Amino acid sequence: MPLVRIVEGPFQPWALLAELEPELGLRPGGFGATAVFTGTMRDFNEGDGVTAMTLEHYPGMTERHLERIIDEACGRFDILDALIVHRVGPIAPGETIVLTAVWSAHRRAAFEANRFLMEELKHRAPFWKKEALADGSARWVEQNTPG
Amino acid sequence: MSVKVRYFASLGDLIGRSEDQMDIEGHITVADIWREATGEIPMPPRTLVAVNQEYADLEQVVHDGDEVAFFPPVTGG
């Protein structure tokens, strides 16, 4: 039962993962690998100091596309389940932006599917970042880093 | 027919609002919606569009009740 959450306030990824994992209904002993990724806000980007960020999304379309990305991962890799949690709204350096996790019988599928989730999310899921810079100005992030 | 138009991120700043409700008649494409809604503002390069929350292209025909969205390349994660 894949799980997608859009979160408006700060969240502690490890605590949230522990809280959400039972909701997936995974059978204890039924999986051998869990691959987890967290993305954290940096205080620098493209050579500038960044003091804060605001994440905008497209309610409805964002969730729909995140669910679809998980569905595609389930079809493409031999995995048992996956979750994506993504922050929106104002965010401070050091806070978690995104949490993805994948469960599978063996490690390869979990690692590869988790990478797939993040790459597809970054290319397709409607989120946009606006940075507040140390010099008082603000700018929209125009493109993803290559990874 | 009635169409809801939404602008996200830098496009919202460019247009100066986040949405429009348009009443428009005829064979209308997404590109027509942009022209009608924004007037003289050229569409920025790499603008993405969605119709009813699915990615679409500028030639897609718009129907009564549709929601059309314009936004820059996505930068989540």
Image (cartoon, coloured by chain):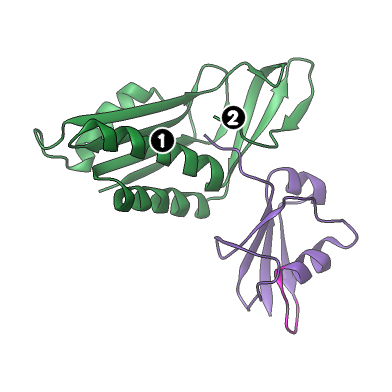
Chain colours: A green, B purple
The answer to whether residue A6 is seen in the rendering is no
Residue located 62% across and 16% down the image? A43
Residue located 22% across and 40% down the image? A23
Real-space CA distance between mark 2 and mark 1, rounded to the nearest whole angstrom = 26 Å
Residue B8: assigned label: none
Residue located 72% across and 50% down the image? B46
Residue located 55% across and 22% down the image? A41
Q: Is residue A92 magenta?
A: no
Total labels drawn: 2
Q: Vertical placement of A48 versus A24: above or below?
A: above
Magenta region, residue range: B24-30
Circle 1 — which element? helix
Circle 2 — which element? strand
Query: Could you tell me residue B35's position as x and y percent?
Result: 82, 66
Question: Farthest residue toward the right?
Answer: B40
Front residue of this view, candidates B17 and A28: A28
Q: Vertical placement of B45 versus B34: above or below?
A: above
Question: Residue A68 vs residue A62: left or right?
Answer: left
Q: Locate the C terminus of chain A by quadrant.
A: top right
Give the residue pinned by disc 2.
A90
Q: Main secondary structure of the magenta part?
A: loop
Question: Farthest residue toward the left?
Answer: A29
Front residue of this view, candidates A115 and A30: A115
- Say which amino acid is labelled 1: Arg
Question: Residue A107 vs residue A134: left or right?
Answer: left
Give the residue pinned by disc 1.
A115
Question: Residue A57 vs residue A23: left or right?
Answer: right
Question: Farthest residue toward the front?
Answer: A108
Front residue of this view, candidates B54 and A110: A110
- Say which amino acid is labelled 2: Pro
